[in-house]
């Protein structure tokens, strides 16, 4: 073996030892709160990726889609049919479409009640609260109450919250926070939302 290959092998052995040690240290199990935020594309679709993973493990999943205006998405058509997946579309669209703050608040509060039932039920292994951050940021829901409810959920239940501009308090409560950066988006080149990619 030449020098270069030997050095590479030694480096990989050291790396493997470090990774194995950190895997051995990570010996806890708990329900996680994940926050997927930022201006880039990929927040909801990442959450739906975890829905697919969970269903593959025969886990029970609940999805609450707040603020959604479309009813023709691939995710709803697909996951809505799965026996272990309960899918609720709880919005009538974005606030600039409904143009009524009062109506938005009523819709948000109704949606939150549906979410609360899942967050109180340990039968749900994963609950996705898609676009929840907007309801908090617009003040449609009481942020303290929402955080308390999330904190008081069943200990083994995972929750994924998506939406831009997640508050510092929500991020503090979360176990995992990813901020997706908007480096480039096809929409700005005049390309409309594409089936399978955007909806
Ligand atoms: P996705 O559902 O594709 O993962 P997302 O949840 O990260 O997207 P949202 O803000 O919920 O983003 O927007 C949903 C829709 O808007 C999708 O069609 C997505 O492609 C599009 N979109 C997301 N980010 C941007 C952006 N930075 N510029 C333009 N369109 C965007
Ligand atoms: Mg989204």
Image (tube, rainbow, N blue to C red):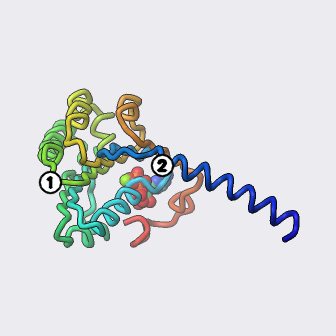
Looking at the image, tell me whether mark 1 or mark 2 is earlier in sequence order.
Answer: 2
Inter-mark Cα distance, 1 to 2: 29 Å
Which residue matches tag 1? 123
Q: Residue at horizontal 48%, vertical 49%?
A: 24
Determine if residue 87 is in view: yes
Residue 18 at x, y percent in the picture: 61, 48
User: At numbered mark 1, what does the secondary structure look like: helix, strand or loop?
Assistant: loop
Quadrant of the image where one finds ligand 1: bottom left
Please state which of residues 10 and 124 is positioned toward the viewer in this rendering.
10
Looking at the image, is mark 1 or mark 2 nearer the viewer? 2
Q: Is residue 163 above or below residue 86?
A: above
Indicate the quadrant where residue 34 lies: top left
Residue 106 at x, y percent in the picture: 14, 40
Determine if residue 73 is in view: no
User: At numbered mark 2, what does the secondary structure look like: helix, strand or loop?
Assistant: helix
Left or right for 131, reference 46: left
Residue 87 at x, y percent in the picture: 19, 61
Q: Residue at horizontal 34%, vertical 61%?
A: 48
Picture disc at residue 110: none
Which residue matches tag 2? 24
Q: Residue at horizontal 24%, vertical 48%?
A: 157
Q: Categorize mark 2 by other alpha carbons within 10 Å: few (<14), some (14-19), many (20+).
A: few
């Amino acid at each position: 073996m030449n020098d270069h290959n030997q050095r590479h092998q030694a480096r990989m052995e050291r790396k493997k030892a470090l990774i194995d040690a950190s895997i051995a240290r990570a010996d806890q199990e708990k329900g996680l709160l994940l926050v997927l935020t930022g201006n880039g594309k990929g927040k909801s679709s990442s959450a739906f990726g975890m829905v697919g993973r969970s269903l593959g493990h025969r886990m029970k999943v609940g999805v609450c889609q707040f603020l959604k205006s479309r009813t023709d998405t691939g995710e709803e058509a697909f996951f809505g049919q799965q026996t272990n997946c309960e899918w609720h579309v709880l919005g009538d669209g974005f606030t600039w479409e409904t143009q009524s703050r009062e109506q938005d608040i009523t819709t948000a509060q109704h949606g939150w009640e549906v979410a609360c039932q899942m967050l109180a039920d340990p039968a749900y292994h994963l609950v996705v609260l898609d676009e929840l951050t907007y309801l908090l940021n617009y003040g449609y829901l009481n942020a303290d109450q929402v955080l308390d409810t999330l904190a008081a959920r069943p200990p083994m239940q995972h929750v994924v919250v998506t939406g831009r501009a997640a508050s510092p308090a929500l991020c503090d409560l979360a176990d995992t926070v990813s901020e997706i950066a908007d480096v480039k988006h096809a929409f700005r080149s005049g390309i409309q939302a594409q089936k399978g990619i955007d909806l």
